[in-house]
Image: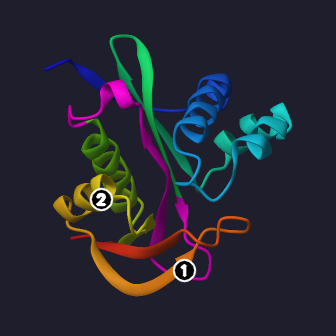
Amino acid sequence: MSAWSIERMEPDDWQRVRAVRLRSLADAPDAFGTQLEEDEARPLGEWRERLANPVAVTFLAVRAGTDVGITVSLPWPGREGTVGLFAMWVAPEARGHGIGGGLVDAVAAWARDGGYARVALDVADDNEPAVALYRSKGFVRSGATGTLPPPRTHITEHERVLELD
């Protein structure tokens, strides 16, 4: 098994975060709320600003010196005590090594340390590997459902929630 680590990103890491995010959107265009063209056009300064947000966190997974995974977490709007797990992705060549679980664990630890009661996420109904990962980490269906934004409203998703100890 290859060694890997999880790193918390800071504003000066914006280029790394942007590169991984764009790669994730190119690899899995129907897994995220935004599309590649949108994030490619995002002003460069906005990437740094996002990482400077004091109530949000971005983690990258690094394997053999290469950034191979990402997740973002911030308070879920309008839901007291809940953070969202967003932008979760692991590079195809790095899957199957526990990296996705490591990213989830990093978000859960950050949320606990911040006094949050739960972590919530939306996942595509047909994304079986992601559903299996989240289930293995204790996430359960909340009953909420939805779709991706237009023009991808045909992609259905459901919410999963992890109650923190």
Badge 1 is on which residue?
Answer: 146
Q: Residue drawn at (25%, 46%), measured in percent from left and top?
A: 101
Rendered location of residue 150, percent (x, y): 73, 68
Q: Secondary structure at mark 1?
A: strand
Q: Is residue 21 left or right of residue 86?
A: right
Q: Which residues are magenta?
A: 74-98
The part of the image, by quadrant, that contains residue 13 is top right
49 or 134, nearer to the observer: 134
Q: Residue drawn at (69%, 68%), measured in percent from left and top?
A: 149
Badge 2 is on which residue?
Answer: 128
Earlier in the chain: of badge 1 and badge 2, it is 2
Is residue 141 found inside the magenta-colored segment of the image?
no
Does residue 117 appear anywhere in the picture?
no
Q: Is residue 57 above or below residue 140?
A: above
Q: Is residue 62 above or below residue 81?
A: above
Q: Is residue 129 above or below residue 44?
A: below
- Count of all numbered marks drawn on residues in the image: 2
Q: Which amino acid lies under the numbered mark 2 shown in the image of this protein?
A: Glu
Residue 157 tag number: none
Q: Residue drawn at (58%, 31%), measured in percent from left and top?
A: 23
